[in-house]
Image (tube, rainbow, N blue to C red):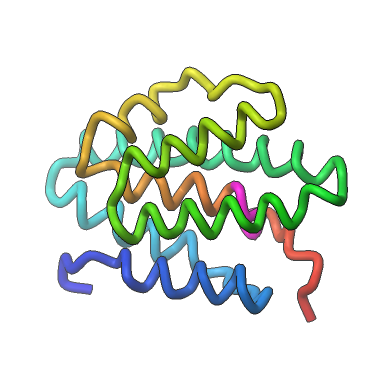
Amino acid sequence: VENKNQYKILDMVLNQMINNRVRFPYLKDILEIQINSIGGMNVEKEKELKTLKEEIERAGESLQAYFFIQKENENKLKAYILKLSNSLRTNNVNMFMDIVTRMYGGIGKKIPATEAFVKMITNKKYFRSLGYAYVIGLEGFVKGGNKDEE
């Protein structure tokens, strides 16, 4: 790992999970390695990022649960996750937030006014880590939400 960024691995694994319904329980661990490398030797910065990661992951899980209340929304959620993943791959904050806005607006909910969302869109260094945490929560693999596992 040697302080190299793990975003390519996160993106590759996430796309495999979505497209092939493959379960990969170590995705959170890869994100954790990335967060540790961002924090570096600064313990406070690392702690802050981990707290924000947990907060935004829960926001994703909460929205994922809402989408699965009605089965017909599963494909819509998958499409959103693919678009979010693409915006993370290209490091495009505006595209990411546009998709998030459409997701919440489409179901008549407001985007959670959390510190994590604010930090994600205002701090370029945090954007991808927090964005991937949100997508991981949204995907539902965090809680073993993959219904197609072998």
* Above/below status of 53 relative to 84: above
Judging depth in this view, the residue of 14 and 71 nearest the camera is 71
The quarter of the image holding the N terminus is bottom left
In percent of width and height, residue 60 lies at: 58, 41
Judging depth in this view, the residue of 107 and 135 nearest the camera is 107
Q: Residue at x 70, y 51 (%)?
A: 76
In the image, residue 140 lies in the stretch drawn in magenta: yes
Judging depth in this view, the residue of 72 and 14 nearest the camera is 72
Q: Residue at x 50, y 55 (%)?
A: 83
* Above/below status of 142 relative to 150: above
* Above/below status of 36 relative to 103: below
The quarter of the image holding the C terminus is bottom right
For the image, the number of numbered tags is 0
In the image, residue 106 lies in the stretch drawn in magenta: no
* Above/below status of 79 relative to 134: below
Q: Residue at x 42, y 59 (%)?
A: 86
Q: Which residue range is magenta in the image?
A: 138-142
Dominant SS of magenta comes to helix
